[in-house]
Each structure stands twice: as structure tokens, then as C-alpha cells.
Amino acid sequence: MGSKGDFHLHSTASDGVHTPAWVMETAAARGVRVLSLTDHDTTAGLAEAATAAKRLGLRLIPGMELSTDYQGADVHLLAYGFDPSNAELQAKLEWLRSGRLRRTEQIVAILGRLGAPIRIERVYEIAGEATVGRPHVARALVEAGHVASVQEAFDRFLHNGGPADVDRVKFGPRETIELVHAVGGVVFCAHPVFIGERYPEVLAQFAVWGLDGIETYYKHYDAETVEAHRALGERLGLMRSGGSDYHGLGNPDDREIGDFGFANERVDEFVAYLEHKGVNTGDWRTA
């Protein structure tokens, strides 16, 4: 294959700024040839992405990002190669999205009490048909003049543990791993450092439950962090992946699609692993 890959991308189907087609087009223009759209708790963007990917000659692996709760930590898991049409999967995703709506309403109420009122209707307008999330609230805060940027909205109000942070319904990690495996996919842990210092022991437990891999390459990882992840993955028998986590929000630590060092033989190894596991690696088509 010998090309760049990006296996952590967001679009307007969840909390990204750009459409699935735009993400595919931009990825192709930046030399990416194999990728995965991983919107939060939804597969709604995959049909549009698949159409664009076919036109552009890209290999699109079905993907999604799922939030889980483990001993008080918010742990994100990336699912790849599953069957998006599975009815049980879609029912569980609908339950998660309903929880996001309730959470958003609570966040908006808290912001009002904190002196930063915004209209819930405007948040939903910004989200459109997407799965609503904190970035949509952040954009409403910017629009209302309460903050100067999405990053400031998170820094002041919306970060985990922040004054307007609200827990939402989530699956447990073991449940998530079992669900994705049941619908033909594999599961990788996204940006493990966000779990905190105990992430190696957390991943060791997840590996016992069947975790398949670890996001070893990420948008702002330095060489030391990449090596630590590589060594941990090797010790636990976990495959390596990489992603830019691109949203298009303009945050200071953003990277362009495909611009984080996951390319060539590393991408080949990742795709070969998925093929060995027998998951869907690019032949998915809309029903």
C-alpha cells in the first residue's frame, strides 16, 4: 500500500465542522489513501463518506468512537470493521444519543446559572442532524460572545470536571468490546494518555476483556510517548493504530488530516491485522 492513513476522524455527523464528503476529499488531497470516519456514537456519516471514498479511490474502513466509563475515568474506544447495519448495534447507539440530548440540556441550564446563557435551540441548530456534543455547546458560547474560542469554552466551562461538565450515559468498556466483537468489528483504545497516569494498568485489564489495539500514534504525541505506547502494546499483545482526531474546530493542538506520522509500513501492518481478523476493511457499501 505504502501510503498515509488516518483512523480517527470526525465530521458533521457528530461534532466535527466539515461534512463526511469534505473529510474524504481533504484526506485524499493530503495523500491519505486508507482511513476511517469515527464519529461519536453514530454511523450516520458512513454512507456519504463511502460514496465519496469510492469516487476518490480511498479505502474506507467503517469506524466509530464510543465513550465508556471505567472507575470514574472517561475512556474512549474506537471501533473498526463492524457491520453498520446491525439492528442491535443501532438500537444501543440510539440510547446513547438520547443520553447526549439530556446531558446537553443540563449543561445549558448550568451555563445560564454561571452567567453564560445560550439557547438550547441554537445548540441543536448548530448540531443539525449530527450527534450533539460539547463542541456544539462551545460553538454556541463563542457565537453568543461569552468566550473567544472553542478552546476557551472548554478551558472555562466544559472540560472534564469543569463547572459545566455533566456526566452522561455510557457503556462500560467490557460491554462495548463485546458489542463490537459481536457485530464483526475490533476495538482500539483512543488516546490512552487521557485516562491518566494509570492508563497502562487500565489497558492491561481491557486486554483481558478482548481489547484489540491501542492508538499508538496521535496528533500531539512526541517520540517518547509513541515509543511508550508501542512498548506497552507489544507487552499486552495489542495492535497499533494512529489518528489525527480531526474535528476542524481550530484548537491549538489540532493537526491536519493525516499529519501525525502514521504512514507506509505502519498503515500496511494495521490493515493487514484487520484483514487477518476477518473484519470489513473497505468493501462496505450502503444498503
Image: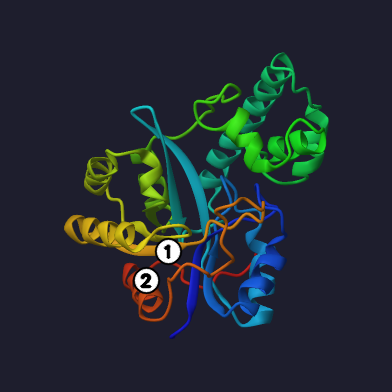
Question: Could you say which disc has been placed on residue 281 in the image?
Answer: none
**On the rendered structure, is 147 left or right of 87?**
right
Cβ–Cβ below 8 Å for labels 2 and 1? yes
> Could you say where residue 119 lies in the image, as x and y percent from the top left?
81, 27
Residue indicated by mark 1? 242
Position of residue 41 relative to residue 26, above or below, is above
Quadrant for the N terminus in the image: bottom left
Query: At 42% across and 51% down in the image, what residue appears?
Result: 190
Amino acid type of the residue tagged 2 in the rendering? Phe
Query: At 56% across and 35% down in the image, what residue appears?
Result: 96
Nearer to the camera, 250 or 167 = 250
**On the rendered structure, is 167 left or right of 172?**
right
Mark 2 or mark 1: which is in front? 1
Residue indicated by mark 2? 270
> Could you say where residue 208 lies in the image, as x and y percent from the top left?
21, 46
Q: What element carries label 2?
A: helix
Q: Hey, which quadrant is residue 256 in on the image?
A: bottom right
Amino acid type of the residue tagged 1 in the rendering? Gly
Nearer to the camera, 103 or 113 = 113
**Badge 2 or badge 1: first in the primary sequence:** 1
Query: At 37% across and 71% down in the image, what residue appears?
Result: 270
Nearer to the camera, 239 or 152 = 152
Q: Hey, which quadrant is residue 68 in on the image?
A: top left
